[in-house]
Structure formats: C-alpha cells, structure tokens
Image (tube, helix red, strand yellow):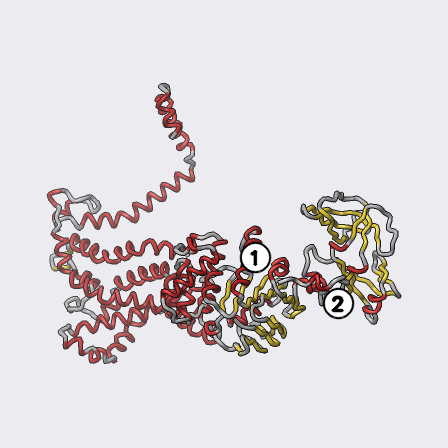
Amino acid sequence: MSDARHDESDPTDSAGGTDGLADRLRDDLAGLDGYRVALYATILTMTVFFLTPIESGLVTAFKTNPEGISSTLPFAPPPPQFFTLEKWQTAMAALGRGMVNSALYAVPATILSALLGSFAAYGLTQADWRARYKAPVLTMLVAGIFIPYQAVLVPLSQFWGAMPLQELLTPLWVLGVPEAYTGLVELTITHVAYGIPICMVLFRSYYRNVSEEMIEAARLDGATFRRVYRRIVFPISTPMFAVVLIYQFTQIWNDLLFALILVSTESSPAAPVVLILAGLGESMEGQDFALRMAGAFIAALPTLIVYIMFGEEFAEGVAT
Amino acid sequence: MARLELDDVRKVFTDDDGSDIVAVDDVTVDIEDGDFLVLVGPSGCGKSTTLRMVAGLETVTDGDIRLGGRSIVGQKPQDRDIAMVFQSYALYPHMTTRENMSFGLEESTDMADAEIDERVENAADLLDIPELLDRKPSELSGGQQQRVALGRAIVREPEVFLMDEPLSNLDAKLRSQMRTELQRIQEDLGTTTVYVTHDQTEAMTMGDRIAILDGGELQQVGTPLECYHRPANHFVAGFIGEPAMNFFDATVEGDRLVTDRFEYPLTADMREAVEGADGVTLGVRPEDIEVTADGPASDDDEFDTVVDVVEPMGNENAVYLGFEADSRDTFVATVGGMRRIDAGESVVARFPSDAVHLFDAASGDALHNRSLEDAADTEPRI
C-alpha cells in the first residue's frame, strides 16, 4: 500500500515499475527447473486426457446427426449450420420417466443403506460386546463387500421369484400404481442389503476415532445408548454421511446389472434411467451419437447434483 | 449430596493371554458428605480406574461402592446421579456452550426448558462465562472449555462430582487460578467431590483429605498435612513434598544408624521405634536440613558436605549436597532465596533429630515420624 503511493509520487518510478515486472518474470522463469517443467507438463497432459472425452461428448450432443457428426472432428465445437438443441429435447422426453423411476429407488436405497450402515458401525464400535461375538458379525459384514454382483444374479432372481412381494404390495396396485413397480421395491431392498457392508466399514473407521471420553460424558449425563447415537454420534457424523451418500447414490443410480435382472425391459413402466439409456439412439439406421451423448449427460446430472450438494462435507469426510 | 463409601473395591483386568492384572487392590475410602477427596498417585496407580468404577464406566470386580448408603454397583452410569469432568473436557463439538450444559438436564430429568435455561445461566454466572453461552467449543480457549466442562457438571446438581485430572491441560498460571476457583465453587456448592490427579501440589492444596495410591493399593488417607508430616510409609513420604524427601539406607548398630556415608545418633524414642528392624531408611525433608557455612562439623548430627548444584527459585534455593566433591550421590536441602550459596562451596548440613523420619527398609512402613511441637497447628483450617 505505502509502496504504491511512493511509486506515484516518484516520476522516475514508472520505468522502475516495468523493470520490476521484468525482474519478477525473470525470477519466476529462473525458478523453473526440470522437475517443475515435467510436473506441469504431466498435469497438463492428465487434464487434457480426462477432459477430452467429456468435452467431445458435450460438443457432440449439440451436433446434428449424421451430417454434423460425420463432417466435423469429434472434439471440435459444432459449426452454426450443424448446431441443434433437438437431441437434448428428444433425450429428455425419452429419459424423463426413467429419471423419476430411478429416483424412486435410488434415493430411499441410498438413505436407508447409509443409516443402517451407520447404526451397524455404532453398534460395532461403541457398544459393549465380547470380542468373541463381535468378530463373526464384523467378518460377515466385511466379507459382504467382496461378493461380486455377477455371483448373486441367479440366486437374486430366484429369491425374488420366491418372495410374495407382489401380493404384499396389493394396496399399491389398488391405488392404480402399475404392478411393474414391484421391481423397484425389489431393487431398493437389494441395493440396501448390498450397500450396508461398505457403509458400515466407512462409518466404523470414523466412529473408532470419536473421543471415548465424549461418549462416556454423554452416558454420565444420563443419555441412553440410543440417545447418545441420536444426539451426539449422528450429528457429528455429517461429513461421513456426505461421503457415504455420494458414494452410494452414484453406485445405485449407475447400476445396470440389478436393474436388468429385476426390471429387465426398457418398455416396462418402471424402467430405470439406465435401462432406457442403454437403448437410446440405437436404431436400424445406425447409432445417433448426438442423442446418446445428450442422454448420457442428462442421466449423469443427478449424481453431479448430489456431489455439489454435499461437496463441502465430502471433502471434510474424506480428509478424516 | 451424599456420603460416598468405597468398600474393599477391587478391579482385575484380564489380559488377552488370560493373565490377570490387578489395577485396584481392595481400596477402602469413606468420603463424608460435602468432602473434597483427592486421589493422588503416580501414573498407572489405579486412581483413574477407581474413579471410573465410581462413575460406572468400569465394572467392579469385587467389593462395594455405596452412595448415600445404597449400593450403586451394577447401576448404569446414567442412573447414578454423578457428574464427571474429564481431562480432555469431552465437550460435544456440534453443540454450543448452552446446549452442552443443558444436555445432561434434558437427558436425565423432565425439567421444563425455562427451568433448564435458568440453571444453565446460573451456572454460567458462577463460572463467569455468560458471554460464551452461544459459542461452540471450537471457538473457545482451553481455559474456557475447561469452565464449560465444569459448568456441564455443575448444572446437573449431582450427588457427587468426579474430576479426572481436569486441570492438567492448562498452562501453569491458569492451572493455579482454576485450582483456587474450583475450591471456591466446591465450597459454595458443598457437593461431595472426588478429584484425581498425579500432581502432589494439587493434592496438597485442594483436598480436605487426600488418598494416596500406588500399584493399585491405598497407601494412606488423611489430611494433606497429616500425609506430609506423618507419612504412613516410605512411598507416601517420597511422593508428597517437592523437592522430595531425602532417603538414606542404614543399619542399626547400638544407638547409632550407620550408612555407608555417615553415622547418625538415635534418640531414645527412635531406638524404641527401630527395635527389631534390621534395615532402616532414614528420611529427612529438604527444608528441615540446616545448612551452615562454618565448618567443620562439630556435632554428631552435622556433616561436612560440598555443594554440587544450586537451583535458585527466587523464594528459596534448592541446594544439592554431596559428602565429597564431585560426588554423584547427592541429597537436596532448601535454603532461603536471599542466601548466597555457590557450587563447590563446603558447607555443614545438620539433620535435626526432631525432623527425622525412619522407615522399615523391607516393608517401607514408617517406624518413627518427625516430632511436631504443637499438632493442632498442623491441622488444616477448613
């Protein structure tokens, strides 16, 4: 501040100012050794590597098909004569109902698996158990993480085939909900069951670092085990909830395999967005790349929104 | 408010390999209603475990704990009507000071919100923190967090306060300030308090009575000055007092104590006390040793020594004396702060016979304690 004022009052200083700039530039360049050059080059390459597909997808979504796509480079922006918003409108119309269906199971499944995972972790870290009983429960839960989706596909469809879920949900059908929505309830429960182990492990590492004295203080303050969770542990696990919610939501929203097994057809009224997206822009005349790209961006939007919503807590949770 | 009784309380931890570790060994202490008892001992002596058993955070292996006459062993911590202040303060980080302080009342009573608020505000006034009520723990300094932790205990108006080294995270100046304040608050409220510390200064200055533990065993329970002047054994004598008491291993030979450095004459009382003991430990407190510059030693209880190191503390100097120059084997005496004394100087140290303690070398039990001219003067005035 005082330097700046000094500069103004001194007429010879304007020359000095440019000298200063040149000096600074020279200093900066002198600071560039081989290591820094390599570092920046690598960062730049990685950035281009990761952003090119996204950029190409985004520009492609605004191009007409097939003229715009065949006559321009994949990553070049659309020239005015090939620019169109039509693909976005088509994709939106096709995916709309799928987005609603996906949200119908992804949101409850995410929240339930996070909550149940948190309960399980609380019980496994803060409750008094004998290690002898605790260890098998923990082992089974951890093993649950490593069961691949493919391995359970047949048992899963047989299991749901044997479950009288459709009869249990009769009140819904009476209210006019299409019976195909049974598939969404099945998806919800399956994803919750599959999500609990990983959620539990994430919460467990967090709860093990919670101050023991604080929990003891709460118990001495008269809070029961359940109240300690409700009033102390649950509120302080917000960062970990952000991590788990983002992770689980992305996982469930993007999952195609279970949706394919339990709902199976894109023509079903209960078809999730991933099923509809799989067939979007496919036709006898070939693939409509612009439509597929627009569809992909629309389908990915909710996961992005969730990430932005919990981003700050996510960073905090990952750091712990 | 109530009387707290620990009756032969024992805690055994079983290790993974099946071996037992006795953490607390048959501790019996009676704490009168409204008393301030300090549990003191070196780390690992079982004092925190004892406190946690009273709180219900550890189970009791054997023995009984009674509060107001009825046993609380087996009760859950939340049913005991006990408030505890932790060393780490253990504040709830997501709650403001006000919420931290009202949490206990909300959970343990069905008091109306207005009443809870009033209690919280009264406690905040008492602790001089009303302006901090709407801040979160992360916005408070260590000393302020300490006060909030205290406030959280006070609003509960429990039967007993338990404090587990609550001042050890504070800097020295704040610690001595809080020491006085804690005592004032405890006196105002008249709540029975058990205070755990490893710091003998805290024990001496704060307690109505102190209980000294070592290796899980109770060594002595008494007023601070009782423990200071009439230690029950070698351990208590060495633990209470700063700088610590000097000890010399000796054998009894006729009417003299013989150490490898000097011989010390026994009075008739002492002779009676040491009868039958083979080895004896002679103990003398640094402030009781009289250091005079004019040598050489002329009396039986005077010894020629050389000053090894002087630690000036302002109000007094701690002088480390050896029986010969450059001896590593030194003992400590304290002299007035205004007195000039230099390392290397030859001085005469006198152990007055009325200030000498004698302990059995094998068991450590006190055989003879110093004489006190007027015992009434040494009792603390409360």
Give the image location of residue A29, x and y in percent: 39, 32
Q: Residues within 10 Å of mark 2 (few under 14, many from 20)?
A: many
Q: Viewed as shown, does residue B268 lie left or right of B223?
A: right
Amino acid type at mark 1: Arg
Amino acid type at mark 2: Ala
Q: Secondary structure at mark 1?
A: helix
Q: CA distance from mark 2 to mark 1?
A: 31 Å
Q: Secondary structure at mark 2?
A: strand
Whether residue A15 is visible to the viewer of this picture, yes or no, is yes
Q: Nearer the viewer, residue A65 or B163?
A: B163
The residue that disc 2 covers is B366
Which residue is outermost to the top?
A: A12
Q: Residue at x 59, y 71 (%)?
A: B31
Q: Nearer the viewer, residue A102 or B40?
A: B40
Q: Nearer the viewer, residue B96 or A268?
A: B96
Q: Identify the subunit bearing mark 1.
A: B
Q: Viewed as shown, does residue B142 lie left or right of A236?
A: right
Q: Which mark is residue A316?
A: none
Please identify the quarter of the rendering in which residue A309 is found.
bottom left
Q: Viewed as shown, does residue B323 lie left or right of A41?
A: right
Give the image location of residue B50, x and y in percent: 57, 70
Please report whichever mark, 2 or 1, sits nearer to the chain's N-terminal start.
Answer: 1
Q: Residue at x 35, y 23 (%)?
A: A8
In the image, residue A155 above or below residue A242 = below
Q: How many marks?
A: 2
Q: Is there a contact, CB below 8 Å, between mark 2 and mark 1?
A: no
Give the image location of residue A156, x and y in percent: 28, 74
Q: Which mark is residue B179?
A: 1
Q: Quadrant of the C terminus of chain B?
A: bottom right
Give the image location of residue A24, x and y in percent: 39, 30
Does mark 1 fall on the same chain as mark 2? yes
